[in-house]
Image (cartoon, rainbow, N blue to C red):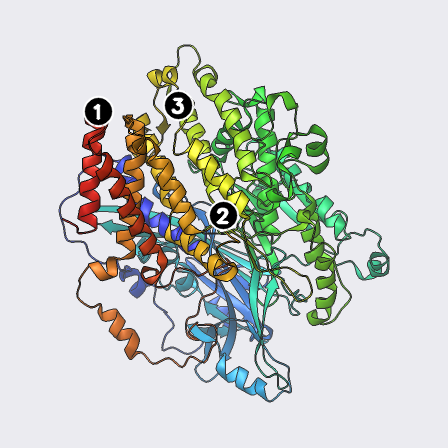
Amino acid sequence: MNKTSFFLAVLAGLFTTQVNAQTTKKFPTKTTKKVVADTLKKKNAADTTKGKELKSYAELLKKATTVNGLFKVHQVETDYYFEIPLKYMGKDFLVVNKISSVPLALNESGLNKGMNFDNKVIRFSQNKLAKTIWVKTIVPQVESPEGDAITRSVKDNFIGSVIESFKIEAYSPDSSAVVVKMNRVFDGTDKSFNDVFTDIGLGTAPKSSLSAIEQIKSFPQNVVVRALLSTRVSEGQSSIPISVAVTTNVLLLPEKPMKPRYADDRVGFFTTPRWYFSDTQHKMEKRELLTRWRMEPKAEDRARYLAGELVEPEKPIIFYIDPSTPPQWRQQIIAGVVDWQKAFEAAGFKNAIQAREVKDIADYDGDDIRYSEITYAASPKSNAMGPAVIDPRSGEILESDVIWWHNVMTSLQSWMRVQTGVIDEGARGNKFTDARMAHAIRFVSSHEVGHTLGLKHNMGASFSFPVDSLRSPSFTDRMGGTASSIMDYARFNYVAQPEDKVTSITPKIGVYDKYAIAWGYRWLDTKDPHEEIPVLAKWIKDHENDPLYFYGEQQSLVVDPRSQSEDLGDDAVKASRYGLLNLKRLIPQITTWAANPGEDYYQAGKLYMAAIFQWLTYAEHVTANIGGYYLEKPVAGDKKNAYTPVPKAMQIKALDYLKQEVMEVPDWLFNKELLMKTFPIKDSPVGPYEYGPYNVRREFQYGILYSLVSQERLLRMMEMEVLLGKDSVYTANELLKEVRETVFAKTQRGKTLSITDRMLQQNYVDVLLVSTDKMLEKITKTALQDNKLKMQHQLQVCDFSNDGKSVVGAEETSLRNIQVSSMSRTSDVAAAKRSELLQILTILEKNKGRGDDATKGHYMDLILRIRQSLRMN
């Protein structure tokens, strides 16, 4: 989840949380007012020296308590002063803001200690005439050679913006530093250094009278400020107080940025943008820089390193385990970190990555940017994440944290029970042994640490393993788990059958991970990153046709079925059928596994729902093959195509699976003995919901059918029909015809329909009606013209780009976008779906007098719906 989406979700969940926690509290009716900062303390805390001459250093600080470090920090009662050496004027600093503590309302919304919510690069500058220090924020994304004529223009067109001004209170005795009062940028009076309540989505301002600086510490490279900021959030008749502790680090960036490495889309790293201007160009050079740690051999070891000998890096990566972490998990979390050492050995480094427990808790602060921490968050949320703080000038990772939510273990337990319980007796109970859970925790630790090293998800890694090989003990032992990369969402081995005796069922660091770390971290003795490009390209070329090295990026809408979440193997149909065999074994065992004598069936109901969701996941994996493309990022000479339709035989095979397992929802999934004890149960903010089996069948079947004939899928099929010819591909018309004949097969034979038969037909007809109406709504609905459209035409933007993006406010995404649905209402999709409705109407009219009363009534209902939608009445 990206940061913006996450914090919007926090806001959305905030009031739901409060209502649940305080259902008996009544708030008086009132008009909601915009929350503004408390101005009382602003007046009291205003600059007391304004309008006065500079005080002497000794007079100003005679009662001060002083801490030495990057800046001397002087505390005079509740006032804090930074003594900033003049040598730091114009230098680059990084301001890093982190959450340090939160109240229950934000905790339940998923906001927790350790989360980094805002960073900015700043520079201090002295205005001698005004006797002030200005703070400018810059975006260090642009570079040009000193001495080039264009560099003058670069400096004029990419200036920093002033965000703050401090009055100089005094000079140090030797005049080498200035003293400024810093309270207002940290205590909530001003929001120039951090604007936490806006950044987390609340949209409020701190109340200064209820906010204060708690502590400031100074170290050789950074200053750490912790403050408690308070606000009140109102919505409708509800109003709740919110206090958040925020830690702000002011870090001096390296004088010489790390030599960057240029990204290649064929290897999955997070990146930061870099623009290059020079006099010799015909256009600006645009690059993406890998985000990675500075991993370099010591000067005295470089010859041995280049000769192929493993050496220790000049500065290893060290993670500290949050002292709040329960002791029984610490060693496996550490093991999950150290497991990456084998990948760094592929890059030529030994002892490159370490994890340590904190020995001196009194002197330790996990929010201090000097420490990379695996933070343990006491929270009901089930998740983990691995963000990093980077130097945007080079992509260097300066510090990284893994945020580990306590309840992530509930997800691990659910996955393991459903996916591997039938082949692993230790993964069946409501509570696992500590040893079993610790082993699963190690996998999550390794995955999240992979993100902190700069690696993206590689959703294509699971496709590199043949499905039947996942049933082989020797293969899984040798290759390690379920995919060639732990950065996939491959989860646990649901393919292996009980008779296979497979024991390596957990994802592990694999071939791709070692390759990616070597590609990103192997040190090259070059001065300019451009010199590395041929070497990096050769490393990719050496493995370009080996599926173990394939990188498949995460997709918001699945186009390439090889790169899916939660899937296993190179054949989704075969893998899913093996998965179904294990689900058939699981369903009758649910009450035995999840309801001990004397206990209710709540846990059994939750396990049941998890099993049904697993059935749905298999269907989604299979569906993605229909109308899917195999996506590549070809370069000249590699003989690859960017777009290859999934083979026709595979698409037909996928549809056969859906006909057998979705259009006829299997009865074994709705075990009568189990359903007499519990319906499937799903937790919600207002308590558990018990879902009736007919409701579950109807809802999940509808979702798959809607996806199957979605306009995006049908349009992708039409794109390939136009490109390759209808005889070479599986066409949209063939798909629709096959679905219609399957859904209405019993009707064509004059059979009486069961309630589930009628459900299938109702679902499919409704899917066609709703999706067609949605596609054509612009010509079937009338509305006043949106003034926003007029404003867009009035706004004049110079757009000389050739990629269809405006040069102003263009936003890039890391995900690949395959655009097929523009003006879809004028495509053949609308005609094809309406044609299907007419053919279905003919079938219904012909057979409306056949079957029992329920069947006849069902036919008349569908006839009326279709006629009404097509305006045939």
How many numbered marks, from 0 up?
A: 3
> Where is residue 783 shown, x and y percent of the image?
17, 63
| Distance from the alpha carbon under mark 2 to that under mark 3 | 47 Å
Q: Which mark is first along the chain, 3 or 2?
A: 2
In front of the other: 477 or 822: 822
* Callout 1 crowding tier (Cα within 10 Å): few <14, some 14–19, many ≥20: few
Q: Which mark is first along the chain, 3 or 1?
A: 3
Q: Amino acid at mark 3?
A: Asp
| Residue under pointer 3 | 667
Q: Amino acid at mark 2?
A: Gly
| Distance from the alpha carbon under mark 1 to that under mark 2 | 64 Å
| Residue under pointer 2 | 114
Q: Mark 3: which secondary structure?
A: helix
Q: Residue furthest bottom?
A: 149
Residue 466 appears in which quarter of the rendering?
top right
Q: Residue furthest top?
A: 597
Is residue 469 visible from the viewing direction of this image?
yes
* Callout 3 crowding tier (Cα within 10 Å): few <14, some 14–19, many ≥20: few
Q: Amino acid at mark 1?
A: Asp
